[in-house]
Amino acid sequence: MVIWSTSEVSVFIAVIGMIIFKLWSVWQVSLKAGANREGRVIFLGLLSGLTVFGLTAKIYISHVLS
């Protein structure tokens, strides 16, 4: 089991906040740019996939190093 320190938890919460802001801002920009729904979904899918990959890698590395 991985035991995170207080600073790691606060960084994780900050990262989650940044991810939510990133997805929201990309959605707003795509709306103002007039992108169609398929383009928005593809772009958000790529961003979400890369974000999930990064978070999973962080959790995996933290687990392996503990």
Image (spheres, rainbow, N blue to C red):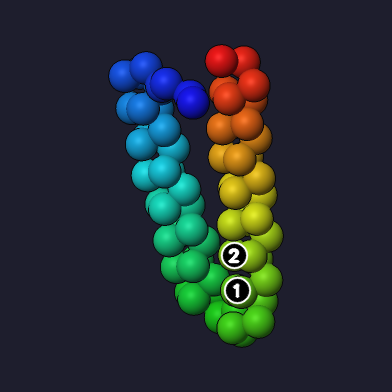
**Res 8 → quadrant:** top left
The secondary structure type at the circle numbered 1 is helix
Q: Is residue 3 left or right of residue 53?
A: left
Is disc 1 surrounded by few (<14), some (14 to 19) or many (20+) residues within 10 Å?
A: some
Residue at 31% x, 19% y is: 6
Q: Which residue position is annotated with label 2?
A: 44
* CA gap, disc 1 and disc 2: 6 Å
Q: Position of residue 18 (x, y in %)?
A: 42, 43
The kind of residue tagged 1 is: Arg
Q: Which residue position is annotated with label 1?
A: 40
Is disc 2 surrounded by few (<14), some (14 to 19) or many (20+) residues within 10 Å?
A: some
Discs 1, 2 touching: Cβ within 8 Å = yes
The secondary structure type at the circle numbered 2 is helix
Q: Residue furthest front?
A: 1
Residue at 42% x, 43% y is: 16
Q: Which mark is residue 14?
A: none
**Res 43 → quadrant:** bottom right
The kind of residue tagged 2 is: Leu
Q: Is residue 43 left or right of residue 66?
A: right
Q: Position of residue 12 (x, y in %)?
A: 41, 33
Quarter of the image for the C terminus: give it.
top right
Residue at 48% x, 58% y is: 23
Residue at 57% x, 23% y is: 62
Nearest to the observer: residue 5 or residue 25: 5
Nearest to the observer: residue 54 or residue 19: 54
